[in-house]
Amino acid sequence: MADPTMSPPTQSQPNVAASTTLRRQHHLNLENLAPSPSSSEHVNRLVNSNHYISPSRPIYSDRFIPCRSSSNFALFNISMPSPSATAGSSPGDGGKEDNSSAYAALLRNALFGPQTPDKKDWGTGAARRNIFRYKTETRQSMHSPFPFGFDGLSGPGVSNVAIKAPRKVSRSPYKVLDAPALHDDFYLNLVDWSSHNVLAVGLGTCVYLWNACSSKVTKLCDLGNDDGVCSVGWAHRGTHLAVGTSNGKVQIWDASCCKRIRAMEGHRLRVGALAWSSSMLSSGSRDKSILQRDIRAQEDFVSKLSGHKSEVCGLKWSYDNRELASGGNDNRLFVWNQHSTQPVLKYCEHTAAVKAIAWSPHLHGLLASGGGTADRCIRFWNTTTNSHLSCMDTGSQVCNLVWSKNVNELVSTHGYSQNQIIVWRYPTMSKLATLTGHTFRVLYLAISPDGQTIVTGAGDETLRFWNVFPSPKSQNTESEIGASSLGRTTIR
């Protein structure tokens, strides 16, 4: 009678072969292949080996299970769940699923853009679009070291902001005006632009007004053969113009009716620098003095500032009207307050005349100054802390400086020997543009009331208009050129 524990030979051979192979894999040595209760248990263990764990040594699998501990979850602003929270959560808690879905959503937005639909929404009508269509918002530089928008400065996160190209500045003036008898004198200031968009220019013994809106030219005054125009300066409201003369007088003119309303004395020599502060007018002269004039008072001047040892050729009030900067042919830069008769700050680092002066409209107390032929440097000062910030050697005489009101940039004009105009980005002092065209020293500079256009004047008897700064609404975009063609007219 057949043993009930034994299987037919034809059926047991595959099981024996399989058991032999599995024995070798698990290093189990069965010395006796004869049927027995113990061998039956071994066969059952081997057949059900997926559910059997050897107590002697671990079973290694070919399945790879990644470790999330080395993942950079901070890159996507996802906090790693704590082990206690993970161990205590049940499969129905959904904690891991929430983290996974958040991770997947941020990764999908970084790779394909914010408009890419989720997988679960593919069946809806709004998402039946080609998700691999070209998207400009996901385009990034192929050389960027941060493909997911992490710039190291703004903090971790995903950014889809496109990198803007550097702003372009036109290298050609959009308008040229002939200005006969425009003096080639470094110490004079013969061009100024009013808040009403009217340009005042001193030509010989006359002052002319050019309306930038209508291009209309008006002759304001003629001082006669015994006098000459040395400086012009618009009041802040743009209705009154101050004119400094070679005889040491300062005249106030009403530009709307071309009428002189006042003439003030006090200087013994020519008045080459003027600066307005509300109702206060400061005048600098070759007699080394600065006179403070209140046009509401009957006196010609209310105070006299002494300190310079040579002609005063540069004057500028700060934007808050609290500090007055003055530069002279004695290579000195002084800063005065509203009540002082002696300079409160003295800077002696320049080695040539200081005519170019500009206050920053962006940072309180930031002052820029430029030196003449023997100096050629633009220097920056912090008048709040009384410190010298930096120095830039321009390679040529610095004649004028003006700061942009729309962006943190400034323009300098130069004389010997390049006769160029340079647009600088502050504080790096990198050159945005170098403009050429004048054949003489670029001695005069003024900026339009909207802050986009500058006008330059030179001894070549021309005034040139340049678009160099962007508008206030597009501070970091490319500047728009306001003229379609180059025009050349005569200012009178």
Image (cartoon, helix red, strand yellow):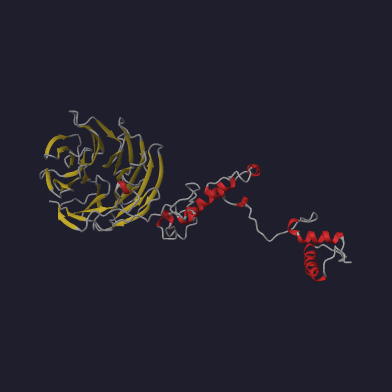
How many numbered tags mark residues here? 0
Q: Where 98 sits versus 317, above or below?
A: below
Is residue 422 among what the camera can see? yes
Residue 367 percent across, percent down from the top left: 35, 42
Report the residue that reaches farthest toward the right. 1
Instruction: Please state if 358 lies on the left or on the right of 203 as rendered.
Output: right
- Residue with the most extreme bottom position: 10
- Which residue lies at the image location 49% right of the left edge and 46% below the top edge? 155
Looking at the picture, tell me which residue is in the foreground, 129 or 191.
129
**In-front residue for pair 5/19:** 5
Residue 287 position within the rendered picture, expressed as x and y whole percent measured from the top left: 23, 39
| Residue at image coords 38%, 42% | 381
Q: Position of residue 435 (x, y in %)?
A: 29, 57
In this view, 212 is above or below 241:
below
Residue shown at 31% from the left, 31% from the top:
340
Task: Find residue 362 and report its image quarter.
Answer: top left
Query: Quick check: 251 left or right of 43?
Result: left
Is residue 280 depicted above or below 434 in this figure?
A: above
Residue 273: image location, x then y, percent: 24, 41
Q: Is residue 353 shown to the viewer in this render?
A: no
Q: Image check: 92 left or right of 347?
A: right
